[in-house]
Image: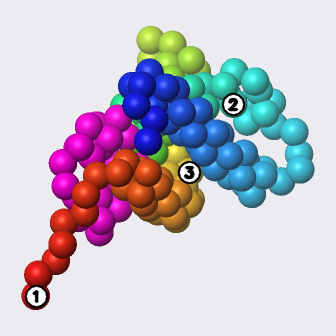
Amino acid sequence: MVRSKFLQAAVLFVYGGFYEFLVWRIFVRWDYGNTHNSFADHPLTNTSVAVFGGLSVCIFMMLMIRRVRRPIASRSFIFRGMLFGLIATVVDFQAFLLAISFYLGGLWFFLAFIDVETYGLILLSFSMPFGLVCWVLAGAAIAFFSGAPAIERTS
């Protein structure tokens, strides 16, 4: 396991940014097809999805890594990884949707937020199955590479 907290945070930031960017691009391809939508393909949109995703994953997964030092039950840790990952995905896309609403609506961003959030719920529901698989694997990898002793189950 990587011991430097900065290096752990950097790896999680890159992992989260790549994951959220990948889900965003799959959703854009699925929803818009091959047409070039100026908003969905704009570099600022793609960058903000990756940065918000990296930050949210970094924050929530670092909270989980702090708990690795104690003996852990593998199932509960993998479940916790799934839960924190899904929360990170929701936080990422909600921050992204708020930023879009503020950009589109200016001071009247609450009115823009209603419209943007409608399409955002489709994006969130699309990303959840990917999130389940991705974050279960992340939780399992953290548990495996942590070196923390597992709790033995007694019958």
The answer to which of 40 and 138 lies nearer the viewer is 138
Residue 127 percent across, percent down from the top left: 54, 55
Which kind of residue does numbered mark 3 sit on?
A: Leu
When asked about the image quadrant of residue 150, the answer is bottom left
Q: Nearer the viewer, mark 2 or mark 1?
A: 1
Residue drawn where x is 39% and y is 25% of the image = 5
Kind of residue indicated by mark 1:
Ser
Q: Earlier in the sequence, mark 2 or mark 3?
A: 2
Q: Identify the residue shown where x is 73% and y is 36%.
A: 40
Residue placed under numbered mark 3 in the picture: 123
Numbered circles on residues, count: 3
Query: Which secondary structure dominates the residues rendered in magenta?
Result: helix
The answer to whether residue 66 is magenta is: yes
Disc 2 crowd rating (10 Å Cα; few below 14, some 14-19, many 20+) is some
Image: 18 above or below 28? above
Around disc 3, counting alpha carbons within 10 Å, would you say few (fewer than 14), some (14 to 19), or many (20 or more)? some
Q: Is residue 141 found inside the magenta-colored segment of the image?
A: no
Mark 3 or mark 1: which comes first in sequence? 3
Q: Amino acid at mark 2?
A: Asn
Do the residues bearing badges 2 and 3 touch, measured as CB atoms within 8 Å? no
x then y, percent, for residue 141: 46, 55
Disc 1 marks which residue?
155
Which class describes the residues within 10 Å of circle 1: few (<14), some (14-19), or many (20+)? few
Question: Is residue 22 in view?
Answer: yes
Q: CA distance from mark 2 to mark 1?
A: 50 Å
- Residue, far left: 155
